[in-house]
Every structure is written in C-alpha cells, then in structure tokens.
Image (tube, grey):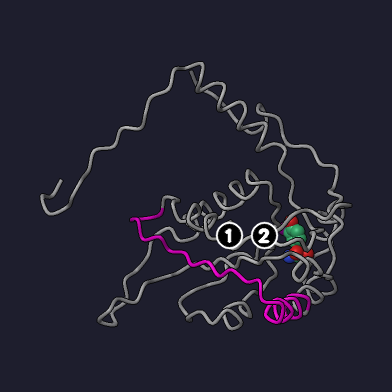
Amino acid sequence: MPADHKFVHYQPERKPEEETLRIIKSDYEVADARRTVRHFSSDPVPREVIETAIRIAGTAPSGAHRQPWHFVAISNPVIKEQIREAAEKEEREFYSRRATPEWLEALAPLGTDFVKEHIITAPWLIVVFRRDYDVLEDGTRQKNYYMTESVGIAVGFLIQTLHRAGLATLTHTPAPMNFLRDICQRPAHEKPFVLMPVGYPHPECLVPDLARKPLNEISDFFL
Ligand code: IYR
C-alpha cells in the first residue's frame, strides 16, 4: 500500500456460530415481512427518523468510495403537490402510450395506474439522486465510478432500515424523472434515481398477494 494512504484496524466482534445463525434467520423473517406499499397513512413521521435512515443509506459501499448519492427529503405539501402533478403527467403518458402491451400485462397483478395519490398522502418523500461526477473546489470535475450500483445498494439499505423501523416505502420510478431535478433544485450532474414515499401503511392498506421465489430458484451453491 502506498505510504501516503492511511489505513486503520478493523475487527468487528466475532459472534458464536449459533448466534450468527439465530440473527440471520430472524433477519430473514423481518425482511420477508416487508411489502412495497402504495396506500399510505398521512400520520407524521419525525424528521429524525428520516435523517437517521439517510445516514444509514450513506453507509453503503460505493465505487472508489465516492459516495455518488444525494438525498432530498420532502414533507412540504406544496412541493409534494408539484411532484405529484409532474409524476402523474409522465405516468399518464406511460400507461396510455409508452408502455408496451407486454409491460402493462406484467404490471396488471400490481394494480398500478397513473394516479399517484401516495405522493401527497405519505408524510415524506425521499428523492435519491445519482451523482455522475463531483465538482471540486477549484471547479474541476472528478469522475465517479459504478454510480448505479452504488446508489442501488444505498437505496437497498434505505428500504430495509425503514422497514425495520416499522415504516413502509414505495420504490417509485416515474420515467422520465428529470422534473425531480428541477423541483428539488439539484445540479445538472445529478440524475434522479428513485422517488420514494415513506410513511406508515394506511390502516386499510392492501398489497398484491405475491410470492417470493424460493432459495433454490434464486441460487446455486458449489461446495
Ligand atoms: N412507473 C410506473 C409503472 C411501473 C413500472 C414498474 I417495472 C413497476 O414495478 C411498477 C410500476 C408506475 O409507478 O406506475
């Protein structure tokens, strides 16, 4: 290692095997109970919950540790309404023109349509941006690496941690999403990655009756 790069010791506590097994199995149960939600309660969620969830998302690994993400959290009803209007405009186009019949067929079991009421009902929206490069203090551009993978991992952390805290999320990607950059006042080198309503599920929330693929369908082991 070059001498001018600093390293520090890292040795997380090693748990007994039975405990590891117990933890991982209980984590699986928690994770498997998560459902993507489209019907939110408007009950408030403290800002500190959202801030901490964003901190957790920001612990994700990233290409060359460039942390190529930015999170915009919105509870302001005027801004939420602007986002809803812009998203519904794109989604109306999508459902009536842009989506192929095959795509619409794939979405049918989810019961989605262009109406995006959840954008205003959920107490928070987190808009995640992918930063293609950073602008250094002297104005030069510094390229980022594996931005999509890195931001995808960070969003995974975000979804999982909010679920563990008892909150629901919707992974919403209206396409195209460039309107989010303007509304959130982000620079041109940031690309909207996901629009995520966050809140408690509505008391009468329904989710599609879906099954997850079993382990043997999603994995192979070579021993
Ligand atoms: N963005 C649209 C359509 C949509 C696409 C996929 I792929 C989904 O898994 C769900 C919805 C919408 O949000 O309605």
Looking at the image, is 166 positioned above or below residue 48?
Answer: above
Task: Please give the residue where the numbered disc 2 appears in the rendered image.
Answer: 45
Residue 12, quarter of picture = top left
Q: Nearer the viewer, residue 173 or 198?
A: 198
Q: Nearer the viewer, residue 32 or 73?
A: 73
Give the CA separation, mark 2 to mark 1.
Answer: 8 Å
Q: Position of residue 56 (x, y in %)?
A: 49, 52
Q: Position of residue 47 (x, y in %)?
A: 59, 63
Q: Earlier in the sequence, mark 2 or mark 1?
A: 2
The kind of secondary structure element at disc 2 is: loop
Q: Nearer the viewer, residue 159 or 107?
A: 159
Q: What label sits on residue 131 in the rendered view?
A: none
Q: Nearer the viewer, residue 100 or 147?
A: 147
The quarter of the picture showing ligand 1: bottom right
Looking at the image, is 138 positioned above or below residue 134?
Answer: below
Looking at the image, is 215 positioned above or below residue 141?
Answer: above
**Pointer 2 local density, CA inside 10 Å: few below 14, some 14–19, many at least 20:** some
**Pointer 1 local density, CA inside 10 Å: few below 14, some 14–19, many at least 20:** many
Quarter of the figure with the N terminus: top left
State if disc 1 and disc 2 touch (CB < 8 Å): yes
Q: Is residue 190 magenta?
A: no
Instruction: Write down the region rendered in magenta.
Output: 62-88
Closer to viewer: mark 2 or mark 1 = 2
Task: Please give the residue where the numbered disc 1 appears in the rendered image.
Answer: 50
The kind of secondary structure element at disc 1 is: helix
Residue 126, quarter of picture = bottom right
Q: Position of residue 203 (x, y in %)?
A: 86, 52
Q: Amino acid at mark 2?
A: Val
Q: Amino acid at mark 1?
A: Ile
